[in-house]
Amino acid sequence: MSSDGSLKMRFSQRAPRVLLYSHDTFGLGHLRRSRTIAAALTSIDPNLSALILTGSPVAGRFTFPDRVDHIRLPGVTKLTDGSYASEALGLDIDETTSLRAGLIRAAAERFEPDLVIVDKEPNGFRGELMDTLRWLRKNTSAKLVLGLRDVLDESEVLEAEWDRKGAVAAMSEFYDDIWVYGLESIYKPLQGLTYPDAVDQRIHYTGYLRRETWDHGPELDVDPYILVTPGGGGDGAKLVDQVLRAYESDPDLSPKANIIYGPFLSGDTRVQFEDRVAKLKGRVISLGFDSKMENLIDNAVGVIAMGGYNTFCEILSFDKRAIIMPRKKPRLEQYIRAARAEQLGLVRMLDPDRDGTGTDVMVKAIRALPHQNLPSTGEYPDLLEGLDHIVARVKELLESEEVQAAE
């Protein structure tokens, strides 16, 4: 590290550059996680720049920190049969993937990153990262990092998926570090996979990624409210419906609910929900989307959510009592996380197979919410040290690159 505390590389006399890849075929999770990490890294060095490559269709609706920018890759959408198609272009999926791969390679060549952080997919969407990974290894000294959320899926399903994609081979061949954004004592996302012993030496459990409020966020409600968030909203209709049914059935249920639909809950379903919200005369209010969810969660008295990774981090960061109603399809990620968190006393889970689906189930859960323990009463003091550990590890990686270049 240079004498001023920055990460400026002495051998090149230019500030370090970080490239982050989040494939984002659907939803917001990968982009939001990459944005959080980029913000933490730029905060430690007034010269460091970060560039995010993302396929998120709503990337342009987010605010990015200073010295963080993004390139929107052509979008893809998942069809009902499980296959993919171009979101907007008149190209087949192979042409779209080839176009995305070319843009990724061009960005890497022109940006010349010192560090590359890949979110979740070791070889990218449909292998689109492989050409760039090979080029980086052959032509640069950039450090390559694979970042994994705390839970990926049940081990049997993950093993079959990664074997089909060649993901274990890519993880073993290309990546200097593997960061798990959680705690080993809570869950091991790679358990059940078979990979070389050398890979174990590269795995770093960082802890969860702490979130902060934004200086300029949405106008906050002065009345107490429970925040209801299905994340991106694409598969959140069931959660929203159950909350609305609870308030419709019990006129004394309080406090009021503030529903954030998410950008992907739209169409006739959204219109029907809005009609129901209007009839509740202020006991439930709603908003389509806000990129600064942290402020809304911080101001809430409690949270009802599906339990994706980012929402879970926000619940922990702002120490909010929470009811989690996780999805179980197409993967068990949310259910595994919620079940483990409930076991540890961090949240309350509503599982339809265990608790039933009646309206009274949600009514009782909302009434009991103020009496739940806060997440901070748990026994994990280092639960939210993820960004601190990442910053420390990035300093080590870039300093080792500096030494290698000097030699």
Image (spheres, helix red, strand yellow):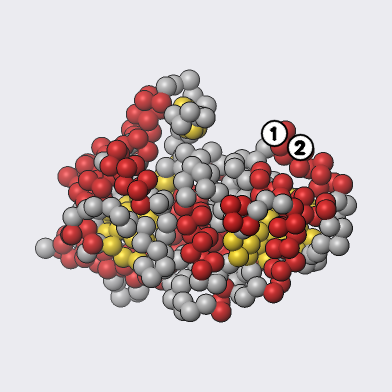
> Which residue corresponds to mark 2?
271
Is 5 left or right of 63, judged from the image as shown? left
Q: Position of residue 386 (x, y in %)?
A: 42, 68
Residue type at mark 2 is: Val
Q: Residue at x 62, y 75 (%)?
A: 373
Residue at x 85% of width, y 55% of height = 282
| Residue 277 in sight from this viewpoint | yes
Instruction: Kindly identify the residue that appears in the image at 72 percent across and 39 percent down.
Output: 270
Give the amino acid at mark 1.
Gly
Image quarter of residue 45:
bottom left
Determine if residue 13 is in view. Answer: no
Label 1 environment density (alpha carbons within 10 Å; few <14, some 14–19, many ≥20) = few
Q: Is residue 244 left or right of residue 352?
A: right
- The residue closer to the viewer here, 150 or 392, is 150
Q: Which residue is mark 1?
A: 267
Q: Secondary structure at mark 1?
A: helix
Give residue 41's position: percent from left, percent from top: 41, 63
**Is 21 displayed left or right of 164 in the figure?**
right
- Whole-angstrom CA distance, mark 2 to mark 1, is 6 Å
Name, please, the residue furthest toward the left: 407
Residue 391 position within the rendered picture, expressed as x and y whole percent measured from the top left: 37, 67
Nearer to me, 175 or 382: 382
Element carrying mark 2: helix
| Residue 148 drawn at (x, y percent) | 38, 55
Q: Say which quadrant the N terminus sits in.
A: bottom left
**400 over 128 or under it: above or below:** below
Q: Check if mark 2's residue and mark 1's residue have beta carbons within 8 Å.
A: yes
Residue 200 position by quadrant: bottom left
Circle count: 2
**If the image is split into quadrants, where does the C terminus sit?**
bottom left
Q: Which of 346 and 311 lies nearest the eye of the viewer?
A: 346
